[in-house]
Image (cartoon, rainbow, N blue to C red):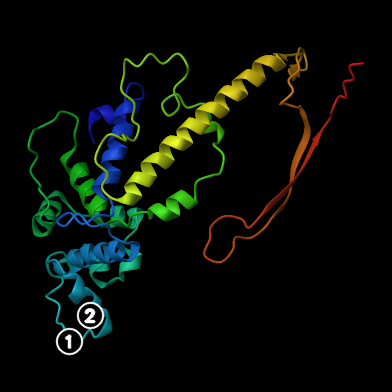
Amino acid sequence: MAPIVKRKQGSNLFNQLLEILRFYAGFEINDHTGLALTDSQMTELHCGRLMELQVGEQIPPHIFRFAFINTTSYRFPQLIAFKHFKNSLSDIALSNLASIERRPELLKQFKQLDDGDLVKLCDHLGIRSDLLVDVQGVDKRELLVEGLVQKFEKRTSQIEAINAMPLYPDEFTLFNDTLVKTQFYSGDTPLALPKLNLQFLTIHDYLLRNFNLFRLESTYQIRQDIEDVVKRLAPRLTYPDRKTEFSGWARMAVSIQNFSIVDVAKPNLGENKPAHVKADVRFFCIYRYYG
């Protein structure tokens, strides 16, 4: 929401630090005891917040679990969305939790509220509606809507996020100077990297920081190898065909003549990636004999 985030230049470092802050604000840990939480416990907390939006008061976890087993044994209070915002938030009050936990659906529901109802909803949910400092360029309505969405949207499981990462870095990660610094980095500016000299929240946090640092180090080494090979190949643009021609030679690179994808299998049950991808790669090898 800050104007610095919307800048096209000079805000990359701030955005990366902001993403780290957002990640640790929703880390799988109990804020009072400091104990690590499992995915099922995080799901219970998430569903409890959504029911808080519907019910109007916080539901204890043991009552939340018991309510789904025997809904007649615990009587919920009057739904806040249905009671105070019957005309505008009736879909939230009468919908199941899975249909209102996504960001697009939450934005659609909250944006249809006027300014007065939006402030009233934040007051009912214990979200501060008054800005501490008036900042030029910050829209109060947009800030309140974003705060509501951040509170109630479904979080991405860390295990699912790690499993969704590619085995090798892609071209965006390799040549993104904000993620992988070049050899000319002088150290005059800080880096948005996981710090190993800070306290670890859980053992998973320790492993995750080392994993991210290892990925960045491997990416930097792969980038150096690619830059060295490209320099040895000596590519140039030919005219008038405007085709890339390699006038050099490198032992770890070969020019691809043709590439085509043959088969893309359907994802396995419970996955969103293809089971396998088959492709044909054609290249021409030059045999060099040194007698």
The residue at the point 16 percent across, 82 percent down is: 74
Residue named by callout 1 = 73
Disc nearer the start of the sequence (1/2): 2
The amino acid beneath tag 1 is Ser
Query: Residue at horizontal 66%, vertical 19%?
Result: 230
Vertical position of residue 41 compared to residue 212: above or below? below
Quadrant where the image shows the N terminus: top left
> Position of 24 compared to 165: left or right?
left
State if disc 2 and disc 1 touch (CB < 8 Å). Answer: yes
- The answer to whether residue 87 shows anywhere in this view is no
Q: Secondary structure at mark 2?
A: helix
Q: Quadrant of residue 112?
A: bottom left
| Secondary structure beneath label 1 | loop
Q: Quadrant of residue 179?
A: top left
Which of these two is toward me, 218 or 11? 218
Above or below, comparing residue 142 to residue 105 in the picture: above
Height in image: 70 above or below 65? below
Give the percent coordinates (x, y) of residue 270: 52, 65
Query: Which image quarter: residue 45?
Result: bottom left
Front in this rendered view, residue 151 or 91: 151
Q: What residue is at 13 percent from the left and 70 percent from the top? A: 83
Q: Which image quarter holds the C terminus?
A: top right
Q: Which mark is residue 66?
A: 2
